[in-house]
Amino acid sequence: MKLDDATRIHHMIEAAETTQAFINGRQRADLDTNQMLLFALVRAVEIIGEAASKVSLDLRKATPAVPWAVIIAMRNRLIHAYFDIDPDILWISVTEEIPDLLSLLRPLLATD
């Protein structure tokens, strides 16, 4: 794996793990009452998507199980439609999709 790709995958893993720490002991309703939590989760998901967009096309093609396009699209949505973020979708992303993503990303670094 190229060094740049490994760095970006590492960034994705760090941000994904951060989301999991942020939601530990939290509920979906906390996003309605805790603006700091909402902003923190949005930022971490943005980082995941930005790092994914910098992963080489070769690695993306070699790892089709990772939903690269969806991850990047989520980042773009959060950045460009910041005024219309759906907390329900964000909560599903961080509680259901990001744990699955971590299980796909961690082995990529383990093979180096």
Image (cartoon, rainbow, N blue to C red):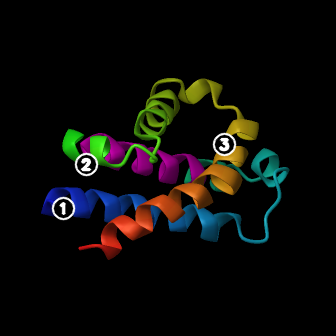
Q: CB of mark 1 within 8 Å of CB of mark 3?
A: no
Residue at the spot 23% in from the left edge and 73% down from the top edge? 112
Q: Nearer the viewer, residue 62 or 45?
A: 62
In the picture, measured across the screen, residue 88 lies left or right of residue 75, that is: right
Which residue is identified by label 2?
59
Asked if residue 38 lies in the magenta stretch, the reply is no
Please provide the residue range marked out in magenta. Answer: 41-55
Real-space CA distance between mark 1 and mark 2, rounded to the nearest whole angstrom: 8 Å
Residue at the spot 51% in from the left edge and 34% down from the top edge? 74
Asked if residue 48 lies in the magenta stretch, the reply is yes
Q: CB of mark 2 within 8 Å of CB of mark 3?
A: no
The quadrant the N terminus occupies is: bottom left
Q: Residues within 10 Å of mark 3 (few under 14, many from 20)?
A: many
**Residue 27 in the image: x percent, y percent?**
83, 58
Give amino acid for label 3.
Answer: Leu
In the rendered structure, which disc, 1 or 3, sits on the residue that comes first in sequence?
Answer: 1
In the rendered structure, which disc, 1 or 2, sits on the residue that comes first in sequence?
Answer: 1
Real-space CA distance between mark 1 and mark 3, rounded to the nearest whole angstrom: 30 Å
Real-space CA distance between mark 2 and mark 3, rounded to the nearest whole angstrom: 26 Å
In the rendered structure, which disc, 2 or 3, sits on the residue that comes first in sequence?
Answer: 2
Q: CB of mark 1 within 8 Å of CB of mark 2?
A: yes
Local SS, label 3: helix
In the picture, measured across the screen, residue 45 lies left or right of residue 3, that is: right
Q: Residues within 10 Å of mark 1 (few under 14, many from 20)?
A: few
Point out which mark residue 1 bears. 1
The nearer-to-camera label among 1 and 3 is 1
Which residue is identified by label 3?
90
Give amino acid for label 2.
Answer: Leu
